[in-house]
Image: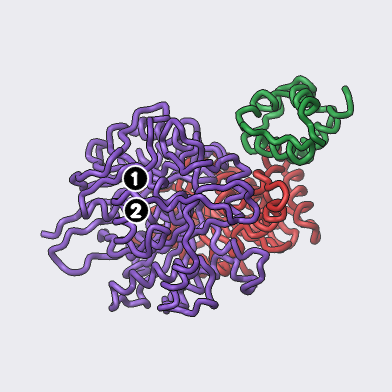
Amino acid sequence: MNLNFLLGDSIISPLGFGTQLNLEAIRQGETALQSHTNLSYQKDSFYAGIIDNDLLDEAFSRIGNLRAYTKLEKMMLLSIHQVLEDFPYLDLERTGLVIATTKANIDELGKGRFSEDRLMLWKLGEVVAKFFGFQDKPMIVSNACVSGALALKLGNDLIQSGRFDHVMVAGGDLVSEFVLSGFNSFQAISPEPCRPFSNDRQGISLGEAAAAMLIGPKTGKGETRIGYIDAVTANDANHISGPSRTGEGLYSSISRLLKANKVKPSEIDFLSAHGTATAYNDEMESIAFNRAGLQDIPVNSLKGYYGHSLGASALIESIITRHNMLNNELFASRNFTDLGVSRPLNIIQQHRSSELNLALKTASGFGGCNLAMFLKKVQDE
Amino acid sequence: MNDLHTELKKSIIDQLNLEDMDVSDIENDEPLFGDGLGLDSIDALELIVLLEKDYGIKLEDPNQGKEIFNSINSMVDFIEKNRTK
Amino acid sequence: MNKKYYIKDYVILRQGRLIRNGEVLLEAGNPELKDFLRKIYKSFGMRYPKFFKMDDLSRLGFLAAEILFDQEKPEADTALIFANSSSCLETDKAYSKTMSGFPSPSLFVYTLPNIVLGEISIRHGLRSENLFLVQDRFEPTTMIDYSHSLLNKAKASNVLCGWVDLHNTDYDVFLWQIAASGRLEHNEEELNKIYLPE
């Protein structure tokens, strides 16, 4: 079966509109997480990564009509537009579109600014496909917080099954009152910027973002590329919101991935974890990673830079991982203080250079879903 | 058993969708979680909402819940001492 | 690569009727959704208190899976590939009504469509592959392609596919299992015939 590659990408986040701007911001130690008080429902201030509407409109006005699109649509359209700019000859008739989102335009619920069907997740796909002229009906993956990486897996499989030549994978979610109030009712919102894996972590911070990634077979010669190797999902079969105390599903997804690809834990150079900074999630991850023999692999969570961007997060983390591998660099796990999980982990505490050939990306989410994915550096002969 | 015990049992059955359960099925000293009524972590969060909505009590530290939600008796004790409505 | 697969069993819940493999198991007139769900639950003698904590979307998928697995328990690596059109919009609306007062955690947790996969996985101990898709109407192409991919790559030994949709009071449920042998080939044409008989 032919290998597919991560060919081009874009991240639209408070850290910048474009992957390079995001990478540079992370290198400078910046964070999207700022204190906000302006949402009507929340009395207390909270930390979140929110994209400035004026900046977004300024950027979007160059490619589309500001009044015709919702905030999330603008973010997502911008990200795909950026990727397509690098691939002007892409045949959109043979390119699939897969979109990862948990709540899509949920912030429009009850507002009446757009037609009622704009709340439908498939409508988001329709709007995006029409904007660029994708011919095939878009596919929407809505599988909680593993959606972004699961969309890559679906895209890869649909290319390998012969349905498409390339697939554009996009992801996006907003910081909405809907989601914020919900996580608040779960007592899961941190009063300060989230601190993944730390002993003083107090919960998640939310962050909004969109991202896009083109995957497909290699083009050109003599390049270093990042290949999508494989991904496995596994359900905890334990609880719909609480992570398994034994890390069952996450462990199972990792161990099946290792086995199917005949990889030993020591061959993995970098682990891009989920790391939401809730007490139970991070603890669960530490247990699963140790059960899988990954305790020595350099690991980080990017939630301290972006907050948790839900359906977009695993896609963004895959994009950052791709560039980390191309640049042979490791990013510090921002806001980490002292280890606050019961099993040892090799948390990356400072940005540093490191030869990266094989990376493992993991994610977990409500509904008991877990995902593990391998990305590998491939050097052309 | 006073009225608060009954009132609380009724609203727990209602709020937590304990279908086919009756006030008389819940003992005052029976554990609400684990082997007793078998409530889970989402139920615990819903009980925190119930305390605030019906009795005006806002739990500052969710970890307090463990002791308060031990049984109907412990919940009644806590509500009687702390209720603001 | 182009190995053939077959449709094993299927269940349909629609307009007060419960159908398994073409046979009407229950006909309830046209009751309210909640009553219909309760009737199925009772008439199959189920005892699973968690059922009453689920939202309607999860109840629909859960019950259909119960009926499908009634005679034969699924293997632990049976993948779940589900789709619908309305995501979990009904529960989104119910939750949003609580937002201005006391946001309800037990409603919020159901504001993700893939929760139904979690409920079925918990019930049957499935630690398997999951995918939830949203599309404007029933069109099984992607579910077919992806399920065959999982089977071909040995990521699953069986697949349970499901269309579980709920919009306003309209519900539409079609679950089917895929097998390596059988009478009906697992393709779009056969699935459309079962989904919408003439």
Task: Identify the residue at image location x=21%, y=48%.
Answer: A357
Chain A drawing hue: purple
Q: Label 1, on which residue?
A: A272
Q: Secondary structure at mark 2?
A: helix
The reply to whether discs 1 and 2 touch (Cβ–Cβ < 8 Å) is yes
Query: Disc 2 sits on a residue from what chain?
Result: A
Q: Which residue is mark 2?
A: A318
Q: How is the image coloured?
A: by chain
- Chain letter of disc 1? A
- What tint does the image give chain B? green
Q: Please report the residue visible at 79 percent of the width from the left and 39 percent of the height from the top.
A: B54
Q: Earlier in the sequence, mark 1 or mark 2?
A: 1
Percent x, y of residue B40: 64, 33
Residue placed at 54% from the left, 77% from the top?
A: A67
Above or below: residue A351 compared with residue A292: below
Q: Is residue A268 above or below residue C139?
A: above
Q: Would residue A263 be seen by someone viewing this image from the given angle?
A: yes
